[in-house]
Amino acid sequence: MLTTLVGMPVEALDTPALLVDIDVMDCNIAHIARTMREAGVQWRPHAKGHKCPTIAHRQIAAGAIGVTVAKVSEAEVMAAHGIHDILIANQVVGPIKTRRLAALIAATGADVIVAVDSPVNVRELDDAAARHGVRPRVVVEVDSGMKRCGVAPGAPSVALAQTIADAPHLRFAGVMAWEGHTVSMFEHEPRREEIARAIARLTETAAACRAAGLPVEIVSCGGSGTYLHAARQPGITEVQAGGATMGDGFYRALEAQVEPALTLLTTVTSRPTEDRVILDAGRRAIDPSQFAPTVRGLDGVTAIRFSAEHGVVSLERPTEWPRAGDRIELEVNYTDQAVHLHEVLFAIRDGLVEGIWPVAGRGKMQ
């Protein structure tokens, strides 16, 4: 039983194992919450990276108003764990998913918000809500420049907002967008300028909705790669930054003022040469495709590559350490592509296992 590991030193864990440094994570949470308070906006962190209700509750205890998720199944997990203010920052399309969403609201009383970008989807949601006797909140997703989902800013978004407002079993709640195109811009000043332009497209759309007589409660945007600047833009009401909770290297490169809290504990299984180290963690334990992990405590690393079950660390010069059986930690630089591969997170404080947190949203893709 994993619960017998609580109170044991980290060395008692088998590998690969995902470790959360509780103190570092809580500092990151406090920083983001403080940033939102100082900017006068709400915090609704995205949970797609950690998929863990325990962490969501820690964020709420620090001041978050609820959570953001990507799927109905993730909303089901959060609602089952007592979190009821949930934004699905995605389209819920088709009769299976819309019925499932309405049934979730009816069964739990959760106040779930869903994003739309087409009148057809509005009708689907309204029909499902009518059958289950619920009235979910709905926001228009505005394309603020990412060119993925969303309606064009201005009049097209206002027209869709009016369609929602006219639907008898839905409640128009506002607008949302994700300025995700800016996270591929690594020069700070041009990125900051484009964040401001993108969010202006959203807030101007919100103003146009109000001018048309539509009440706008929610103007939601921002992620971990943009939160420092998004939170300061006039006219927004909430920011969805969640990944920065773990201090991912991907977000630190984008000015996030956080520290790494998530590591993958591995064991050295082979030293076939003095300049190569083989680990027991491959792509089934961590996906390096977005942002490769960083090897802690080992100098001279020139590369790290992964196959299904092996991590191969190349060194610039021969070394005696580490030896087979030694432990190596990898900093997880993009949480979204590691946590979902594991059943639990081992919460660590002062070198001891303080808790074992289920990744309850693991596998929730529908």
Image (tube, rainbow, N blue to C red):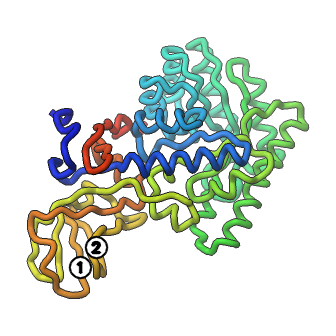
Q: Can you tell which mark lies on residue 304?
A: 2
**Amino acid type, mark 1:** Ser
**Quadrant of the image for the N terminus?**
top left
Give coordinates of residue 264: x percent, y percent: 28, 56
Tell me whether circle 1 and circle 2 mark residues in contact (CB < 8 Å). yes
Q: Can you tell which mark lies on residue 215?
A: none
Give above or below for 288 relative to 29: below
Q: Nearer the viewer, residue 243 or 213?
A: 243
Residue with the mark numbered 1: 314
Give coordinates of residue 167: x percent, y percent: 73, 23
Give coordinates of residue 143: x percent, y percent: 69, 52
**Amino acid type, mark 2:** Ile
Q: Residues within 10 Å of mark 2 (few under 14, many from 20)?
A: some
Give residue 269's quadrant in the image. Answer: bottom left
Give residue 123's quadrant in the image. Answer: top right
**Quadrant of the image for the C terminus?**
top left
